[in-house]
Amino acid sequence: MLVKVYGVEAVSKECVFEWFKPFRDGKEDVEGEPRSGRPPTSTTPDNIERVRRMLADDRRLSVDSVSKIVHQHLQKRRICARFVPRKLSDEQKQHRMETSGDFIDACDQNPQFLEAIITGDQL
C-alpha cells in the first residue's frame, strides 16, 4: 500500500521491520533514548540562573518589559522556538525571489515536480 501511494519514495519493508523490532521486544513508548547534542529547549539550568541573576539585579523587570525589549527594541520574533530578526535583509529577499523563480520554472517544465518533493502524511 505504501508503494502504491508513495512510489519509489516509500519506506522499505526492511525499514518498517527495524522500526517495529523494539516494540516486538517489549518496548511500550514511542520516545527515543536520550541523545547528546543541543537540548530541545532553552529552559536549561544555566539559562534559569542567568534570568534569576538578571531579575535580582533589577527588580523592576517584568514579563511585559522583557517582551517589549525583545520584540520592539531588538526587533525579534519567535519562529520555531528561535528568535529571529523581524525584517529580511535585501540579500535574503533576493535569495527568496530567485529560489521561488527556480521552483516556478521547475513546475512549468515538469508538472510532476511537486510530487517528487512533497512527501509526508498525505494518503
Image (tube, rainbow, N blue to C red):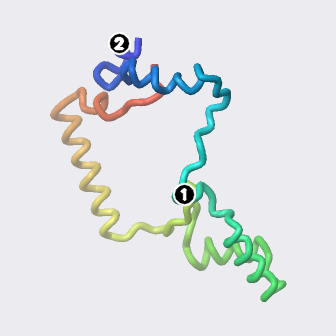
Q: Residue at x 60, y 22 (%)?
A: 25
Name the residue rendered at 74%, 82% in the picture: 54
Q: On screen, 108 above or below 75? A: above
* Quarter where residue 2 is shown: top left
Q: Nearer the viewer, residue 121 or 41?
A: 41
Q: Amino acid at mark 2?
A: Lys
Could you tell me residue 21's position as x and y percent?
A: 52, 23
Residue 53's spot in the image, x, y percent? 76, 82
Q: Residue at x 73, y 75 (%)?
A: 49
- Which numbered circle lies on residue 4? 2
Up-down relation of residue 55 to residue 116 (above or below): below
Q: Residue furthest left?
A: 109
Disc 2 residue crowd, few under 14, some 14–19, many 20+, Cα 10 Å: few
Q: Quadrant of residue 15?
A: top left
Left or right of 47? Residue 98 is: left
Q: Amino acid at mark 1?
A: Ile
* Labels 2 and 1: the sequence-earlier one: 2
Is 1 in front, or is 67? 1
Is residue 42 shown left or right of residue 90? right
Percent of width and height locating residue 76? 56, 69
Density class for disc 1 (Cα within 10 Å; few <14, some 14-19, many ≥20) is few
Name the outermost residue toward the front. 25
Q: Secondary structure at mark 2?
A: helix
Q: Quarter holding the N terminus?
A: top left
Can you tell which mark lies on residue 35? Answer: none
Inter-mark Cα distance, 2 to 1: 36 Å
Question: Which numbered mark, 2 or 1, is in the foreground of this view?
Answer: 2
Residue depicted at x 60% and y 48%: 34
Tag count in the figure? Answer: 2
